Amino acid sequence: MERVFRHFQEDLDTLKARLLAMGGLAEERVRESVRALTDRDQSALDGVLGGDEPINDLHIEIDDRCFKLLALHQPMAADLRVIVAAVKINTDLERVGDLAVNIAEAGKRYLQHPPVKPLIDIPRMGEIAQAMLRDSLDAFVRRDIALAEAVLAQDDLVDALKTQIFRELLTYMLQDPATVEPSLDLILISRHLERIGDHATNVAEDVIFILSARDVRHQGVEPAPE
Amino acid sequence: MERVFRHFQEDLDTLKARLLAMGGLAEERVRESVRALTDRDQSALDGVLGGDEPINDLHIEIDDRCFKLLALHQPMAADLRVIVAAVKINTDLERVGDLAVNIAEAGKRYLQHPPVKPLIDIPRMGEIAQAMLRDSLDAFVRRDIALAEAVLAQDDLVDALKTQIFRELLTYMLQDPATVEPSLDLILISRHLERIGDHATNVAEDVIFILSARDVRHQGVEPAPE
């Protein structure tokens, strides 16, 4: 029993390490997609488009690890929460990888037009979303409830930036039809970044759920207004 | 042991029934948001905006049922897959409820302007997304792999409609700046409907995973191009 227990803790630690690796990959792909957009770097955008195999492989591997942990060790309440949370976090990270692809796709269309404006808010939004992702995963691994709560607070900042980007681009579109198409792509990219922030928020909520057995979901937190 | 087993099957059946109820609620909210948009029915949109408590309550209840099933019965491989899939499906359905709210929010803004065009493609997209949702849950409960695969095939139709809606609205926006704001809201609504189709696709993939122990995820299925 002692040996099985130690084995379980090792497997759980490996699971956490793999989730961190997946989070690192997802974050890196978001960073690269936004950087390539900002630098108008076509080939880097193609790199993001063609590079989601490692993250997809990790997605399947981590799911598999969770199932094995559940099936072989039949963990009790506290560990059960961690493993089920890992299944959910794994799904969120995989979606973040997909959103990096969506950003790269919109970015490629955006580059077919002259720049609408210098990109400042979108890289800023990207940085915040990446930091949220990193912090939420750190909170998971370090069992840090204060850090998870700090992530939830960041989400308002992302929403405010999204609204600001939308309003600014709307004025361009109303003034000059030539900016309509590229502005639309920037609006879509800001929505993709918002959704990355939402996924980080999901992770942070799972962490709070694990640590406090308190369910912070649906406490007057409505989906972000568009 | 016999009694525990029967108890487990009953709990599992209840879990499935509650997931179906949740799916019905989510589908109903999507239907109502699109109908209210099409009929320009402000008060029905307000009803959608204020009515997500039942679905949020069910979300927490179902999660709780899954945890209890895992903790009390320590199910083996096949049942384990069903319960972990239920956790994931529950998350997808809750997001669908959020997206109905997003549609209602964009709908309220849309109604502040004269109609851009008669709404035909968006209700059609809504119907397909609802059918996908319904079929994916039926496939889960009835263990119907062919039905789950049919849902996956429908997703291309949703993407094609989304692209068609985008192109049409773009021509309006380029011709007449007065249509820019309301057209943007219709584009966002079509994206929300696309995401509802994506959630139904997730459910269908989980069903195939449960039934065939075959992982259909990441088999060259890239995120939908924008």
Image: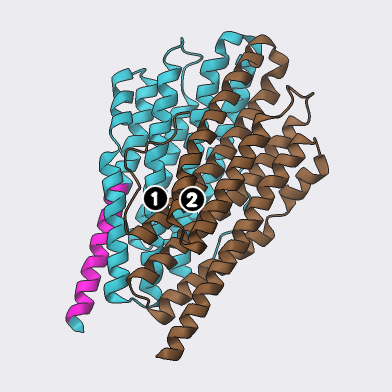
Chain colours: A cyan, B brown
Circles 2 and 1 in contact, beta carbons < 8 Å:
no
Predominant SS along the magenta part = helix
Q: Is residue A214 visible?
A: no
Residue A190 horizontal side relative to residue B26, left or right: left
Q: Nearer the viewer, mark 2 or mark 1?
A: 2
Q: Which mark is residue B62?
A: none
Q: Residue at x 33, y 36 (%)?
A: A29
- The one nearer the camera, A86 or A221, is A86
Residue located beneath label 2 in the image: A201
Tell me where residue A11 sits by quadrant: bottom left
Q: Residues within 10 Å of mark 2 (few under 14, many from 20)?
A: many
Name the image quarter holding the C terminus of chain A. Answer: top right
Q: Amino acid at mark 2?
A: Thr
User: Secondary structure under badge 2?
Assistant: helix
Foreground residue, A71 or A114? A71
Where residue A147 appears, x then y in whole percent?
Answer: 43, 55
**The stretch drawn in magenta includes residue A7:** yes
Q: Nearer the viewer, residue B143 or B118?
A: B143
- Foreground pick, B131 / A2: B131
Within-10-Å neighbours for mark 1: few <14, some 14–19, many 20+ = many
Which quadrant of the figure contains the N terminus of chain A?
A: bottom left
Query: Residue A54, position in %: x, y?
Result: 25, 42
Q: Chain of mark 2?
A: A
Task: Report the residue at 64% width, 41% height from top.
Answer: B127
The picture quadrant where one finds residue A49 is: top left
Answer above or below: position of B170 versus B134: above
Q: Residue furthest front?
A: B146
Q: Which residues are magenta?
A: A3-22
